[in-house]
Amino acid sequence: MKRAYLPWLAIALGGIACIVAWRVDAAALLAAYLAAWWCVTGMLLGGLANVWLHNLTGGEWGEAIRAPLLRNAQWMWLAALLFLPVLFGAAHLYPWAAHGDAGARWQSALTAPAFKHAWLSPAFFIARSVIYLLAWCALARLSMQPGLRRARLFSAFALIAYGFTVSLAAIDWIMSLMPLWYSSVFGLLAGTTQMLAGMALAIVIAVRRGTPPALLRDLGNLLLMYVMTWAYLSFVQFLIIWAENLPHEIGWYLARVRDGWLGMAQMLALLMFFVPLLLLLSRRFKQTPPLLGALAAGICVMSLLHAWWLVLPSVAQPRHGWMAPAFPPLIVLGGFVWLAAMRSRGEAMEDVAATTPEKSHV
């Protein structure tokens, strides 16, 4: 069988698996889809945020990853369209959006009902989601315009808009899976995780494109910074909530220390923090392309596991956890990232339109 038919075969088999999984547990299927979508879209947005950061700070490190990250951002419109299953299936996924008595019970359990009832209403939820997606598509589109590619004022505005929208999106799409739980650092942690994943994907592409070791060392230092920031925010959130020991807050973590989720949390701590921290402290390691590329690829995989850990314990029953690695939209979304990476790899190291400094009137 020719290789050209393999993606279509995967999609067909995936479609059949989706139908079976939907009949078994629609909520678990949508949760697995949301986790995969959040991971992949986070890589696109996080990579774009790193481009904006480079526009503000300067440095040679950004020239090695600017072109592929901007090309990857061209897929933002597709990511926005792929969110439609979550919007259409919100009643199956979010308890406050459920029809009938189930949704009424959750609405009555919410604190500050005047605010939360208005915020967690299906119509307002869909409207906000559309605004977030349109904003990200617009930012991605504007970031590729010749007059704005390196504009500092635009980049500052884009980072502010990104931080605001991704924080609200994390609250709406991830936190509200357990409507009684809340965390003031959750939005900042979501943005940091995306920028970490975006930098990891950028390093994978940079290594495949033959980036000089000196620039890889700079990228490795930035990756170390993101790893440490992610670990710090994750630990602070856990420490404050666990120390307070309030029922409506601690319930989120209790769901993640049962049924094998504690093992995944320990794996994330080990492979997304301790191992990268120790390895990235070595100058020689950061200047060895195969080693740095392998570590960055491992962090990309850990980002998917982290998305599963954020989403699935809030929704899926343990016996339906097989849907996360096995169901087909994950294959489609993984192929989406692979296609973007391969397209970037196939082009020249220097992208004149994206890397040549331009005069900006902003």
Image (cartoon, rainbow, N blue to C red):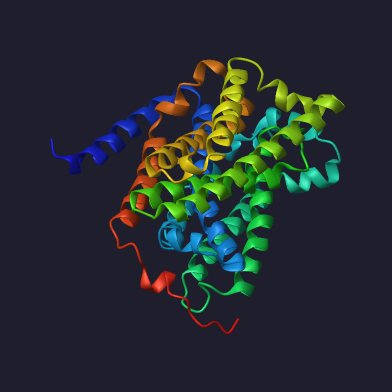
Q: Is residue 118 visible?
A: yes
Q: Residue furthest front?
A: 284
Instruction: Indicate the quadrant containing the N terminus: top left, top right, bottom left or bottom right.
Output: top left
Task: Report x, y in % for residue 293.
Answer: 41, 42
Task: Report x, y in % for residue 267.
Answer: 56, 24
The answer to whether 286 is drawn above or below residue 298 in the figure is: below
Instruction: Indicate the quadrant containing the C terminus: top left, top right, bottom left or bottom right.
Output: bottom right
Tell how many labels: 0
Query: Residue placed at 34% from the left, 33% from the top?
Result: 14
The answer to whether 217 is drawn above or below residue 59 in the figure is: above
Task: Report x, y in % for residue 343.
Answer: 31, 55
Q: Horizontal placement of 126 versus 357: left or right?
A: right
Q: Quadrant of residue 74?
A: bottom left
Q: Quadrant of residue 102?
A: top right
Q: Residue furthest left?
A: 1
Query: Residue placed at 41% from the left, 30% from the top?
Result: 327
Q: Quadrant of residue 172?
A: top right
The answer to whether 232 is drawn above or below residue 157 in the figure is: above
Query: Residue placed at 51% from the left, 54% from the top?
Result: 47
The front one of 237 and 115 is: 237
The front one of 200 and 130 is: 200
Query: Residue placed at 71% from the left, 42% from the top?
Result: 186
Q: Is residue 22 visible?
A: no
Q: Horizontal placement of 181 versus 351: left or right?
A: right
The front one of 329 and 103 is: 329
Q: Horizontal placement of 206 versus 175: left or right?
A: left
Task: Report x, y in % for residue 140.
Answer: 50, 63
